[in-house]
Image (spheres, helix red, strand yellow):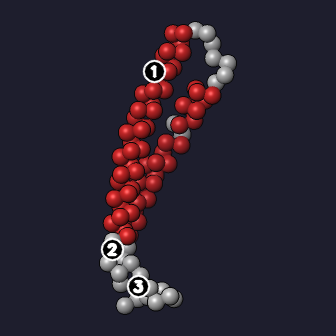
Amino acid sequence: MVQTENKQPIKEISHQDIYSLYDSWEQLQSWQEVLPVLETFFKDENRPINKQQIARKYYACSQIFTVFYVDFSQSMQKMEKQLLELRSKKKL
């Protein structure tokens, strides 16, 4: 049995497990380009008084947020499942 310096068994983690977790991480990272659009919209203190333009931008941002929220929630569940599987892997 392979052990650490503290005599603890080392868990067996395959490359597939690592790639799967990395894919989940990349999926969450992909939102870094889109989310600043929402931040800019909601931080904009100098919005024009044009109510129609505000309504259109608000609708577009709400659609982006909805897609993000669904994807983020699913990604977090997937990542949690992956981490639980990794934690329960057999020890070498």
- Seen from the viewer's position, the closer of residues 50 and 34 is 50
The Cα atoms of the two marked residues, 2 and 3, are separated by: 11 Å
Residue 5, how many percent across, how many down?
Answer: 51, 88
Task: Label 1: state its secondary structure.
Answer: helix
Q: Identity of the amino acid at label 1?
A: Tyr
Question: Which residue is labeled 3 in the image?
Answer: 9
User: Which residue is pictured at 33% across the width and 73% down the height?
Assistant: 89
> Which of labels 1 and 3 is toward the front?
3
Q: Earlier in the sequence, mark 2 or mark 3?
A: 3
Residue 25, picture quadrant: bottom left
Q: Identity of the amino acid at label 3?
A: Pro
Above or below for 39 versus 81: above
- Rendered image: mark on residue 89: 2
Q: Is residue 78 left or right of residue 49?
A: left
User: Which residue is pictured at 51% across the width and 9% down the height?
Assistant: 52
Question: Which residue is labeled 1 in the image?
Answer: 59
Q: Earlier in the sequence, mark 2 or mark 1?
A: 1
Q: Is residue 52 left or right of residue 18?
A: right
Instruction: Bin the neighbour count of mark 1 within 10 Å (Cα to Cα): few under 14, some 14-19, many 20 and up.
Output: few
